[in-house]
Amino acid sequence: MSKVCEICGKHPTTGNTISHSHRHTHKMRLPNIKRVHAYVNGKKAWIKVCTRCIKSGRVKKVS
């Protein structure tokens, strides 16, 4: 499953976890992506969107 929001384009970001002894280990932060049945250009479709877009009302969900 692709972890990219189809509305805002939010995607995974990478970074390092740094311990007390300054050892670096790689870390990925994944966005909270949900599969939603919504209207896209007037038609019903399944899209993958982040929860921020769902909560802000950018997605018109099918009832």
Image (cartoon, helix red, strand yellow):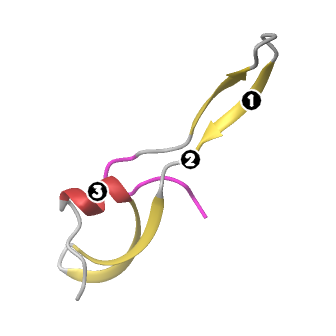
CA distance for labels 1 and 2: 13 Å
Q: Amino acid at mark 1?
A: His
Helix, strand or loop at mark 2:
loop
Q: Earlier in the sequence, mark 2 or mark 3?
A: 2
Q: Vertical placement of 18 versus 14: above or below?
A: above
> From the image, which quarter does the N terminus lie in?
bottom right
Q: What count of labels does the image hold?
A: 3
User: What separation in Å lies between label 1 and label 3 (alpha carbons)?
Assistant: 28 Å
Horizontal and vertical percent position of residue 23: 82, 15
The magenta segment is 1-9
Q: Position of residue 34 (x, y in %)?
A: 45, 67
The reply to whether the magenta stretch includes residue 3 is: yes
The residue under label 2 is 30
The residue identified by callout 1 is 26
Question: Where is mark 3, residue-wise?
Answer: 53
Residue 30 higher or lower than 56, as above or below: above
Contact between labelled residues 2 and 1, with CB atoms less than 8 Å apart: no
Which amino acid does the dot numbered 2 rest on? Leu
Q: Residue at x 24, y 82 (%)?
A: 43
Indicate the amino acid at tag 3. Cys
* Residue 5 falls within the magenta-colored stretch: yes
Q: Nearer the viewer, residue 17 or 3?
A: 17
Marks 2/3: CA–CA distance: 15 Å
Query: Residue 41: horizontal and vertical position, in percent?
Result: 20, 73
Secondary structure found at label 1: strand
Predominant secondary structure, magenta span: loop
Decide: few, some or many residues near mark 2? Use Cα within 10 Å; few <14, some 14-19, many ≥20: few
As drawn, 10 above or below 63: above
Judge left or right: residue 60 versus residue 28.
left
